[in-house]
Amino acid sequence: MNNIYFIIFGMMMVTFIPRFLPFIMINNKKIPEKLQRFLKFIPPSILGALIFPGILQSVPGNIYAPLAGGLFAVVYGMFKNDFVISVIGSILVTYLVIVFI
């Protein structure tokens, strides 16, 4: 039973150390402006890489409905910053394309 605690602690350290080390290493250093601009694009690109395959596989046999819903979410998100309306609207657009096409 005690081995499970060592395994959990080991897994915690393996994930904690790589996340904590950058904070220690660049604590008081100035990050160049170009690198800061580059780093701002990483979260949206990772989120897009995680979401896009799921969008394509959400409606088996129909590629147009999820693409229409995803396109609605992207376009609406570019002009408005309302996450709830973007999700509800993309679901509605996907449903309407499934029903009418």
Image: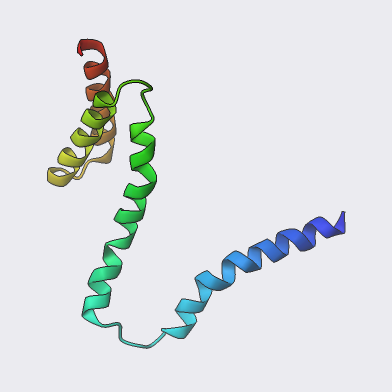
Which residue sits at x=38%, y=28%? 58
Residue 27 in percent (x, y) is at: 42, 84
Name the residue at the front extreme.
61
Name the residue at the bottom extreme.
29
Q: Is residue 45 above or below residue 79?
A: below
Which residue sits at x=22%, y=24%? 93
| Coloration mode | rainbow
Using the image as rendered, state which of residue 58 and residue 20 is in the foreground.
58
Residue 85 in percent (x, y) is at: 23, 33
Is 12 left or right of 70, judged from the image as shown? right
Q: Is residue 56 above or below residue 2?
A: above
Using the image as rendered, state which of residue 60 and residue 26 is in the foreground.
60
Residue 14 in percent (x, y) is at: 62, 67
Q: Quadrant of residue 73?
A: top left
Which residue sits at x=35%, y=20%? 61
Is 71 left or right of 57, judged from the image as shown? left
Residue 88 in percent (x, y) is at: 27, 28
